[in-house]
Amino acid sequence: MQNEFGKKIKNKRLHLNLSLKKVCDAVKNDDLKSISVSYLNDIEQGYRNPPGGKIIVQLAKKLELDSQDLLNLAGKVDPLIEETVSKKPEMALLYRRLAELPEDSDIIQKLNKELEKGNGKK
């Protein structure tokens, strides 16, 4: 019953030689309490669906995985995007307009280049 998300988490955890408890101690829920070992085990075994975005981002950090790849695998939206859109409605409109453009749009390519410049990338 194991799903791809749970499989990836488990394989990486074992590769890093981390116990379930060690990973759980590093991952906090909304109440700032560590997630339980049984909860993470159930996710790894596919008995539970992937957790929410905030927990996924923390798991990715602890397991040295790319958070966006893990969010995509779980079918979740980055919590930073959710938070930004909820606080700034104009961002939702901007995102919607960008999403409607074809991937090879000149606008998207130019925007990506400008954003990379701002992050010190070339």
Image: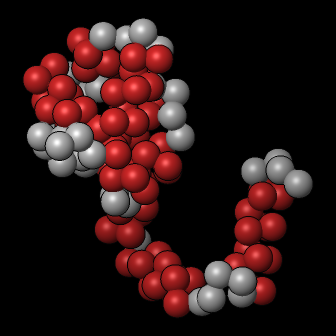
Residue shown at 50% from the left, 49% from the top: 69
Q: On the image, which quarter does residue 92 sit in?
A: bottom left
User: Taking 28 as reference, is 113 left or right?
Assistant: right
Residue shown at 43% from the left, 56% from the top: 72
Quadrant of image for the N terminus:
top left
Give the colour scheme of this rendering.
secondary structure
Residue 39 on image: x %, y %: 13, 30
Residue shown at 52% from the left, 90% from the top: 100
In this orientation, which residue lies closer to the viewer: 109 or 45?
45
User: Taking 100 as reference, is 44 left or right?
Assistant: left
Residue 43 on image: x %, y %: 20, 36
Asked if residue 95 is positioned above or below residue 82 in the image, the reply reads: below
Q: On the image, which quarter does residue 87 sit in?
A: bottom left
Residue 104 on image: x %, y %: 72, 83
User: Taking 63 as reference, is 31 left or right?
Assistant: left
Residue 77 on image: x %, y %: 37, 60
Asked if residue 5 is positioned above or below residue 23 in the image, the reply reads: below
Asked if residue 54 is positioned above or below residue 35 in the image, the reply reads: below
Asked if residue 22 is positioned above or below residue 118 in the image, the reply reads: above
Q: Is residue 110 visible?
A: yes
Q: On the image, which quarter does residue 78 sit in?
A: bottom left
Q: Is residue 25 visible?
A: no
Q: Farthest front residue?
A: 1
Quadrant of image for the C terminus:
bottom right
Q: How many labels does the image show?
A: 0
Residue shown at 33% from the left, 52% from the top: 74
Q: Farthest right residue?
A: 122
